[in-house]
Amino acid sequence: MPFRRIPTLPMLVLLAAVCPAFAAPPQAPAAPVPGQAAGAGKDEPQPPVPQKRFREDVEVVGEDALAAQEAADLPVRPVEVMAVAGAADNVFRALQTLPGVAATTEFDSRLSVRGGSPDENLTVMDGVEIHNPYRLFGLTSAFNPETVRSFDLYAGAFSAAHGDRLSSLLVVENRPGTSSRAFAGSSAVSLTDANVLIEGKLPGAAKGSWILTARRTYYDLVANSLVGTQLPAFGDLQGRVDWQLEPGTTLSFFGLLSRESTDASFQGDRAGEQGAFVTQARNDLAALSLKALLGTRVVSRTVASWYENADSIGADARFRAESRRSNAPSDEIGFRLADIAFTRELGVRDLALRQELSLDLGGQLLDTGFELHGLRTSTAWLIQGDRNPSAANGSSVQGGAGLPDALDSAVDGPRAGLWLQDRFTAAPGLALEAGLRLDWSGVNRRATLSPRLAATWRLGARTRLRAAGGLFTQSPGYEKLIQSDYFVDLSGALGRSLRDERATHAVLGLEHDLGAGVSARVEGYWKGFRDLIVGRLESEAERLARVARYDFPAELATSVPTAAIVTSFPVNGAGGNSWGVDALLQRKPAAGARLTGWASYSYGVARRDEYGRTVPLEYDRRHAATLVGSCRFGPRWDLAATLRAFSGFPRTPVVGLRVAADETSDGRFVPALDAEGRYVYETDLGGIANLSTARLPAFFRLDLRLSWRPRGVAGRWQLYLDVINATNRKNAGQIDTTLAYDPASPLDQPGLVEKRAASIPFLPSFGVRFRF
């Protein structure tokens, strides 16, 4: 999204969605045997059950598999995603409550994991890489918790089976439909969308199941007719069929069709303010998977998939530019109207094949496989209006001055990966995992080799020491830039000139079971980054050519932006590191437990070396504490609460004012004047030396959720009241600087006023769940 005005659209969605909701929890699937093919019977041959592999992770697991998990796993099950206060049925918002995981904004589902950027996170669903796992501009996720069996988040040092990302891995596994009933179903409505789910076993003598669900926004069906415009909306249709061909062999088909659209217009309260925003998006997926038990010691999974994500947005608007005005007493004369006119299109098409093999060698488990991606990515935009003066970095997708006016770029970037991983017991109580991964990218035509090593040492029946490390790489590609805060042009020779980004991970953790379902964990981590891709600075010739366009008198020379700006031409020009400590105390759900949840604290430092200086990463967050809990008051009442307290992210502060410029027909920039001849001023963010030199205020938020089941846990009905930001605290997702008339100014300049912005207000909702 090229301009900050656009992120207000998610707020429209939230406000429109505050209405009665009618929903139902998912039908609990039949409990599977770990390692068993979907639909297999108890007496049929089973694939070998691998040893518990080392995972420096927090796992969100299905209820059926809960008993098989080790103490390190955090049991935020898919059914609980719909019960965590403030999560709004969104798995990414539930993950944001975990140690070391930060939300980039209150509205956003994007994650920063242990100092990494959102584009460094890999999301895989049923063996398929999901390039855009969000809906509604990131307000909600692409995953329906009604159909998901497990969410596994690996916060670092993940295994060699996955690659091409620097920071984290999210693995999502969907559940099959019920095989015990001919027909079952449920319905659900969250704050942003509603869904209906039906499922059942295959007809006749066929062994297997099917599941079908439809999900869409509901607020727009009423609100659009009231507000006279089309609010942001989406709809998904998702289906899966699992067919057991023979004992130990299952063929599965998964399909997803998703559409998003907006056609919103507004007429401002002030003269001349008006605008229109049009968006279209689609996320489509078709995947065929074959799981097979080959003999008694080999398990194979083959996944062939086709995925397409296309996203377009257009804006044509004029509104008051709060950070640009003269010192006229009248606002109508002092303020200028900003012209926002742009179009932007993104596209990713991925035809992929993934092959996995697990070999049980008797006390040793060998995993190997490969993946192939036939990637076609493209981006195009046209910027005809004003640039965003609050984008301090010129390559910012929020409308930075270093972005090109026009671009139409397509990149064929096939990718391939090959891995080998060995897990074995080296000594009593000591398990080792050694892996090696080879990746190749067609964008830069380079290959990288990544060794990885992990170990788990049991110090006793209740205590485990875990360590892991390795090399992780990320190739250049537009598919990563979908989640990035910055844009670089990867066309032709520009992309081929780049090296893969690299990160070295090291993790050390200690876990201890305290009894009664309570466990504690402390982990230290370090990540070293190098060859990070950033936009290069203007060359001296480019800087001089830009500055030469300013036709300002000598007394206004300080208003000419002479410092070099960041462009969209890519270079491997940055490095850095992140390190910290995460502590987690949790009580797992158990039969009869009245109080469940977790408490966490994280201390982290994330720095980047770029443009000749060391600065905090955009998501460097030193302190973060979270408390998530649920208390059951008898069989009918539950009270859930989520309390968060964070230190603020870095920000780039305004350093002063400068005279704004107007472009003439012959391409010159001249001082801007108001209708009475006064200079028009705008905020000045300084040069690169001022990037990230201040911080946002501390963040606090309390979310509450009260649930009532008229017939208890076994009943079909549930009523709930959910309140986000229960204390109505005015947090600051960003600091907006506005200009105001200053009658005492000796230089006839307006005054600066800073305001907190981009935060969720007090937001209540209520609803009903029902299953059938």
Image (cartoon, rainbow, N blue to C red):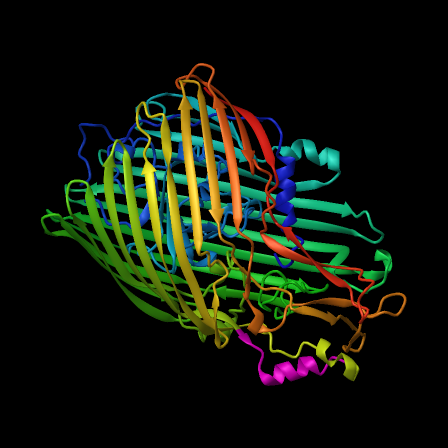
Residue 246, position as x, y percentages in the image = 24, 34
Q: Image quadrant for the C terminus?
A: top left
Report whether 426 appears left or right of 130: left
Residue that lies at the very extreme toward the top in this rendered image: 711
Q: Image quadrant for the N terminus?
A: bottom right
Identify which residue, 102 or 502, lies in the foreground. 102
Q: In the figure, 136 relative to 633: above or below?
A: below
Q: In the figure, 471 relative to 424: above or below?
A: below
Report whether 447 appears left or right of 642: left
Magenta span contains residue 543: yes
Q: Quadrant of residue 380?
A: bottom right
Residue 710, position as x, y percentages in the image = 47, 15
Q: In the figure, 387 relative to 288: above or below?
A: below
Q: In the figure, 517 relative to 409: above or below?
A: above
Magenta span contains residue 349: no
Q: Quadrant of residue 634?
A: top left
Q: Residue at x 63, y 71 (%)?
A: 686
Report whether 283 appears left or right of 449: right
Q: Quadrant of residue 453?
A: bottom left
Q: Is residue 133 visible?
A: no
Q: Which residues are magenta?
A: 536-551
Q: Residue at x 63, y 51 (%)?
A: 756
Residue 746, position as x, y percentages in the image = 81, 70
Residue 229, position as x, y percentages in the image = 73, 40
Identify which residue, 162 or 302, lies in the foreground. 162
Q: Is residue 123 visible?
A: yes
Identify which residue, 440 or 57, lies in the foreground. 57
Q: Residue at x 79, y 48 (%)?
A: 268
Residue that lies at the very extreme toward the right in this rendered image: 676
